[in-house]
Image (cartoon, rainbow, N blue to C red):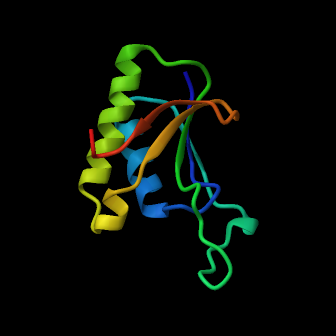
């Protein structure tokens, strides 16, 4: 199973870095995607809304899904601002828009 921490929309570098590090520390193979040039954040023009996405190559089993959930939720709970703590992060199947699960701190 390959996991991708996809920050290509430029949602939150710090969040993406921490999630990637913790997942790798747990022995998972994780790719990290950096923001594209088109995803430059300019508050005068647009707002990045897509944020961070966790992509999986196939539907994860219950144990892997729980691990990803626990890591992402833990990082969100420790975020330095209310705006960052209130973020939702989807687990999506591959490059599709199909969301398998939404992760946030409000469960």
Q: Give residue 44's position: percent from left, percent from top.
A: 63, 85
Seen at 71% across and 61% down, the residue is 36
Quadrant of the image containing the C terminus = top left
Q: Nearer the viewer, residue 5 or 76?
A: 76
Q: Position of residue 19 (x, y in %)?
A: 40, 47
User: Residue 29's x, y, as percent?
Assistant: 51, 31
Could you tell whether 25 is left or right of 94 in the image?
left
Dividing the picture into quadrants, the one containing residue 79 is: bottom left
Task: Report the quarter where the N terminus lies.
Answer: top right
Of residues 93 and 45, the one drawn nearer to the viewer in this rendering: 45
Residue 69 position (above or below residue 37): above
- Quarter holding residue 63: top left
The number of numbered badges drawn on the structure is 0
Quadrant location of residue 39? bottom right
Outermost residue to the front: 106
Residue 40: x and y, percent?
67, 72
Residue at the outermost top position = 61
Q: Is residue 6 left or right of residue 40?
A: left
Q: Residue at x 40, y 55 (%)?
A: 87
- Residue farthest right in this picture: 38
Foreground residue, 11 or 97?
Answer: 97
Residue in view at x 24 percent, y 56 percent: 78
Side of 107 where 36 appears, left or right: right
Q: Is residue 99 left or right of residue 104?
A: right
Above or below residue 86? Residue 103 is: above
């Amino acid at each position: 199973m390959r996991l991708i921490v996809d920050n290509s929309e430029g949602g939150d570098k710090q969040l993406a870095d921490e999630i990637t590090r913790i997942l790798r520390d747990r022995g998972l193979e994780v790719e990290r995607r950096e923001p594209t040039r088109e995803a430059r954040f300019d508050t005068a023009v647009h707002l990045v809304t897509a944020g961070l996405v966790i992509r999986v190559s196939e539907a994860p089993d219950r144990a892997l899904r729980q691990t990803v959930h626990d890591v992402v939720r833990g990082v969100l709970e420790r975020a330095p601002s209310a705006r960052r703590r209130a973020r939702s992060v989807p687990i999506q199947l591959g490059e599709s828009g199909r969301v398998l699960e939404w992760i946030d701190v409000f469960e």
